[in-house]
Image (cartoon, helix red, strand yellow):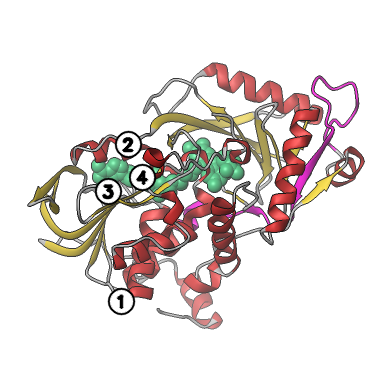
Amino acid sequence: MQRYSLPHLIRRGLRGQRGWTRAWRKAAPKPSYDVVIVGGGGHGLATAYYLAKLHGVRNVAVLERGWLGGGNVGRNTAIVRSNYLWDASAHIYEFSLQLWEGLSRELNYNVMFSQRGVLNLGHSAHDMHGLARRVGANKLNGIDAELLSTEQIARLVPILDTSAAARYPILGGTLQRRGGVARHDAVAWGYARAADALGVDIVEGCEVTGIRAAAGRVAALETTRGEIRAGKVGLVVAGNASVLAAMAGLRLPIQSHPLQALVTEPLKPVLDPVVMSSAVHVYVSQTDRGELVLGAGIDAPTSYDLRGSFRVIEHTLAATVELFPIFSRVRMLRQWAGTVDVCPDASPIIGPTPMEGLFVNCGWGTGGFKATPGSGWVFAHTLAHGQPHPLNAPFGLDRFAAGALIDEHGAAAVAH
Ligand code: FAD
Ligand code: PYC
């Protein structure tokens, strides 16, 4: 990887942006690869990077139908935390959080991981019971978690309406101090650059339109840039997982929904931690540029629409003002949606499929950004060995037949 000295960078900066090398090559697809990853989002790129780096599998392509980072990795609200309830989830998300803590150094790329804390609010005795249970479970798994009183929350975030007069009064909450936010695009770009440097072909503008099998195992992909043969294929296409799986004759237990986010005009710094309330259905963080990033629950109808409904926008803004009356006159700048792939238990599917050589990594729903490094790590292991890593073994497709569901609706923190 190229490294530049400071004087060199200053000289280049003053000269303008001539002579910069591309962060990753514009690769054309080869006729055949050992492994093809479908989907150039965060999870697909991280998988390719760890395949090449940790397993020496370098004859790898990442096929992306649009532009790199144009999917959910570039559309999400960038919240990173590991405070999930069940052991299997706690282990994989905590592993991922530990990777986040060293990711900028690992990739030699600043992913701007900012551990400003994630605060989850409780508004009823039922909420508080669930939050206390989760704090206990997190501590047993070595995850930092604190149960806060209303007074502690008022000191931490003075602009929250912590009065008893609020429609849904804040009765307490949980804080994960090691949680926070990262720069989502930088995560895609950093993994892409590092994977490319290890020889991975990143092929943009290449849509997979069919999956061909021979003698029961995956043989090739039909794409808009011709047929590509593959020893193994990993489908990592988030909201489009069921569409791709159907090409192999598989029906996944996944529903795709729009999930919206909104951004305001920039303000002076007023909000330090990320604040989430799954009862009032909103979460808010402030970016380094000062904008507030807001989000809500999913749009209930299944759809691939990238706008979402106005009803959810209205609800999100009403909930924001209810929690933070000080924001009532802030102007909104923009809004968008991404397509999220939701499993019945709000947990992902990472593992083999009934078609030999075909693997899926999907179902991260509203919460996969935080899992990007860990998901890539374990999926690379799964592809390289043909067997799940211990961390993703509980997340196989077989759990839906065995009834071994991992219900994380509470920890998902976004209503589905
Ligand atoms: P993507 O970036 O969507 O990658 C999948 C790629 O597959 C896409 O680029 C797509 O173009 C490509 N593709 C699809 N079909 C094909 C095809 N046929 N051929 C080739 N390529 C194809 N998670 C969190 O942890 N924290 C959050 O704060 C958070 N907030 C969110 C807010 C919003 C508004 C949304 C929409 C999601 C949020 N998420 C969050 C969820 C998170 O974004 C996703 O779970 C995660 O990004 C999905 O993995 P990915 O990055 O690989 O997906
Ligand atoms: O998983 O923390 C999360 C999250 C926040 C917003 C969307 N997903």
Which stretch did the figure color magenta? 159-187
Write down the residue under mark 2. 252
The tag on residue 56 is: 1
Q: Nearer the viewer, mark 4 or mark 2?
A: 4
For the residues labelled 1 and 4, the Cα–Cα distance comes to 27 Å
Labels 1 & 4 near each other (Cβ < 8 A): no
**Vertical arrangement, residue 191 with respect to residue 127, above or below:** below
**Vertical arrangement, residue 118 with respect to residue 327, above or below:** below
Write down the residue under mark 3. 353
Labels 4 & 2 near each other (Cβ < 8 A): yes
Q: Earlier in the sequence, mark 1 or mark 4?
A: 1
Q: Residue at x 67, y 54 (%)?
A: 179
* Mark 1 surroundings within 10 Å by alpha-carbon count, few (fewer than 14), some (14 through 19), many (20 or more): few
Q: Earlier in the sequence, mark 3 or mark 2?
A: 2
Q: Nearer the viewer, residue 135 or 220?
A: 135
Please tell me whether residue 171 belongs to the stretch shown in magenta: yes
The amino acid on which the numbered mark 4 sits, given as a three-letter code, is Leu
